[in-house]
Amino acid sequence: MIRRAARIFVALAGVLLVGSCSGSDAGDRRVTEGRDWHWDKTAGVTEAAAFMNVAVPEGATQAKGAVQVNPQEDVYLLSFVTSGKNAEDIAHDLHSEHPLKARKKDFAPEGERFGHFGLPEPQTLKSVRSAGVCPPCVKDARRKNVQWIDIYVQAVGAGQARVYLQAF
């Protein structure tokens, strides 16, 4: 009986200790599939664009950027609305071995990353075209520290397109 009470006491103390150690940014930290991650509050468009070595076109609107800090590798997000031609030029500049193409809407996105901006996840959109590239694989020295970049381009009307970029 004493041993059982001691075990319950130790378990309760552990729960209380963990709860008391959570910081004031607990709302920004999440554990997903056993992983602890959070949004870097100081990073935005400039940091995401610099990591990907992508220039946000002059005149682009609704530019948003963020960095999701993860235990293994950070994920950089960038989104903006620009002309359809600028969106195509950005996709071409990534040197993907495959051009932008429509994908079936039969897969789920990896979490809710672009939801951080209040945007739908691009993988869930019907009118989106996408491509992916491994910069080191295509010998893109400008992006040698980037392992992968996904680009999604969604036509939004009047010759404009929303560009979604995700890199790690």
Image (spheres, helix red, strand yellow):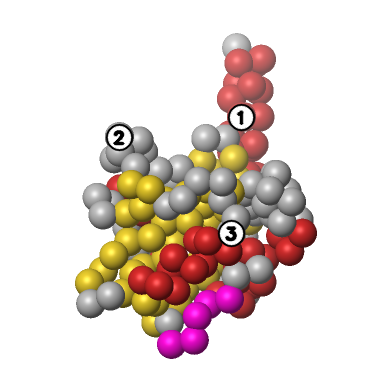
Seen from the viewer's position, the closer of residues 95 and 76 is 95
Amino acid type, label 2: Asp
Residue 113's tag is none
| Nearest-to-viewer mark from 2 and 3 | 3
For this view, does 16 lie left or right of residue 150?
right
Crowding near the residue tagged with mark 2, few <14, some 14–19, many ≥20 C-alpha atoms within 10 Å: few
The residue where tag 2 is placed is: 106
Amino acid type, label 3: Leu
**How many labels were placed on the picture?**
3
Please name the predominant secondary structure of the magenta segment in the image: loop
Per the image, label 3 sits on a secondary structure element best described as loop
Judge whether 140 appears above or below 63 on screen.
above
Crowding near the residue tagged with mark 3, few <14, some 14–19, many ≥20 C-alpha atoms within 10 Å: many
| Nearest-to-viewer mark from 3 and 1 | 3
Q: Which residue is farthest top? A: 1
Measured in 3D between alpha carbons, the distance from the residue under mark 3 to the one under mark 1, in whole angstroms, is 52 Å
Q: Which residues are magenta?
A: 55-59
Residue shown at 31% from the left, 74% from the top:
160
| Nearest-to-viewer mark from 1 and 2 | 2
Per the image, label 1 sits on a secondary structure element best described as helix
Evaluate whether residue 97 shows in this view: yes
Q: Position of residue 84 (x, y in %)?
A: 36, 71
Q: Quadrant of residue 23?
A: bottom right
Q: Position of residue 6 (x, y in %)?
A: 66, 23
The residue where tag 3 is placed is: 94
Seen from the viewer's position, the closer of residues 41 and 21 is 41
Crowding near the residue tagged with mark 1, few <14, some 14–19, many ≥20 C-alpha atoms within 10 Å: few
Residue 11's tag is 1
Judge whether 163 appears above or below 133 on screen.
below
Q: Do callouts 3 and 1 mark residues in contact (Cβ within 8 Å)? A: no
Q: Which residue is farthest bottom? A: 59
